[in-house]
Amino acid sequence: MQIVASELHRGHHSVELDGGQLIESWEGPARADLIGSALRAAGHDFIEAQPIDPALLGSVHSADYLEFLATAWARWESSGAKGPGAMGFTWPVRGSHPVRPRDIHGQLGFHSSAADCAVMPGTWTAALASAGIAATAAQLMTRSGSTTYGLCRPPGHHSTADQFGGYCYLNNAAVAAQTVLNEGASRVGILDVDYHHGNGTQSIFYDRSDVLFVSLHADPLTSFPYFAGNADEKGVGRGAGFNHNLPMPHGTNFDTWMDALEVGLASVESARCDALVISLGVDTYEHDPISRFTLTTADYQPMASRIRALGLPIVVVQEGGYAVEAIGDNVVSFLSGLSG
Ligand code: Q9C
Ligand code: ZN
């Protein structure tokens, strides 16, 4: 299988607010390095990502947001702020109709949904490279007709058109899906198997019928991102019926998870998708330090085999997974199931 990767992720390691303290984030460079070495050991071919096309990025994210992300670190530093990462401290109030503030501190709140990540000196470079990986992998898949994997880091599925959060800055899965559409597909499915609901991806495509979003995740009543991911969120306007959430409780095991997968795949089949983007989080793993499902390394192979049986062309983008000691094996297990 063709693997698309980049070294440029390494300049990004955020701080995160965790239990009221700023810690070095669970989402760090070791994740991609360990996945990369496991994939090399398993004999996969690596291809360097192409730079992302700004027009493609602009079709997924707002121009204001992209300008903000590109300049946030420099503006933070010149504001005299001393913190290790640029973070907001106040967010739009429920029910308000906020005007975009002018200064960096106001914009950090306006353009973020969580205080679990910040804009660091290397964030923009890493996020651009990650989105470039997704676009390159998607293009490679459409042109070769075979499955590709984008070793994206930082992850993307919590990023909306104009907000970062949940360790995500640019929405790589959305970039991949839009790329497949631009290459001629009529409808693309996104299957998000990360432990956390892909609130960013959902919101980007919520009113569109050319992208079906199906997500299996921990119930937002008790898990991040808390404010999206419920079963009654089904899309609006032309997108009505093209958003399918399958929330599950803490402690969910592989059998229960696979039952939900059947329900989700039925939606993919009835929407007649031309291709599938998989948002692959392996934070459903039993020993993930920040998650509460009980899947094992071996489970990822039959999971992927079942998805492969749909017979659709597939591009995989990497999302979460924080048990670094097992992250390489978990991804290799999944990709072995996709290869048959
Ligand atoms: N420090 C992805 O898996 N957790 N993001 C914050 C408090 C947020 C996970 C915990 C989890 C985000 C891509
Ligand atoms: Zn996750």
Image (cartoon, grey):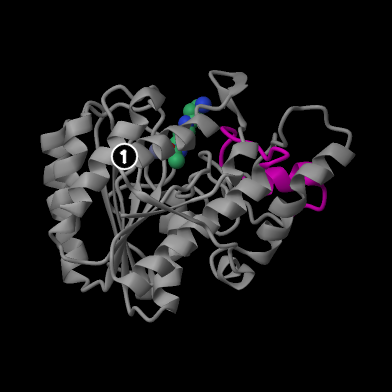
| Coordinates of residue 330 in the picture (x, y in percent) | 29, 35
Residue 164's place in the image compared with 134, above or below, is above
Q: Regarding mark 1 in the picture, which secondary structure is present there?
A: helix
| Coordinates of residue 78 in the picture (x, y in percent) | 89, 40
Q: Quadrant of residue 181?
A: bottom left
The kind of residue tagged 1 is Val
Image quarter (top left, top right, bottom left or bottom right) of the N terminus? bottom left
Where does the magenta region start and end?
A: 100-122
Residue 109's place in the image compared with 89, above or below, is below
View quadrant of ligand 2? top left
Residue 233's place in the image compared with 289, above or below, is below
| Coordinates of residue 179 in the picture (x, y in percent) | 45, 70
Q: Is residue 113 magenta?
A: yes
Q: Please state which of residues 221 and 4 is positioned toward the viewer in this rendering.
A: 4
Q: Quadrant of residue 211?
A: bottom left
Question: Residue at image x 54%, y 65%?
Answer: 60
| Coordinates of residue 178 in the picture (x, y in percent) | 45, 69
Q: Can you see residue 90?
A: yes
Q: Which residue is the site of mark 1?
A: 331
With 310 as the anchor, is 29 left or right in this view? right
Question: Residue at image x 19%, y 63%?
Answer: 267
Q: Can you see residue 219?
A: no
Number of marks in picture: 1
Q: Quadrant of residue 58?
A: bottom right
With 75 as the anchor, is 230 left or right in this view? left
Residue 89's place in the image compared with 194, above or below, is above
With 142 as the anchor, is 106 left or right in this view? right
With 249 as the anchor, is 100 left or right in this view? right
Q: Please state which of residues 76 and 229 is positioned toward the viewer in this rendering.
A: 76
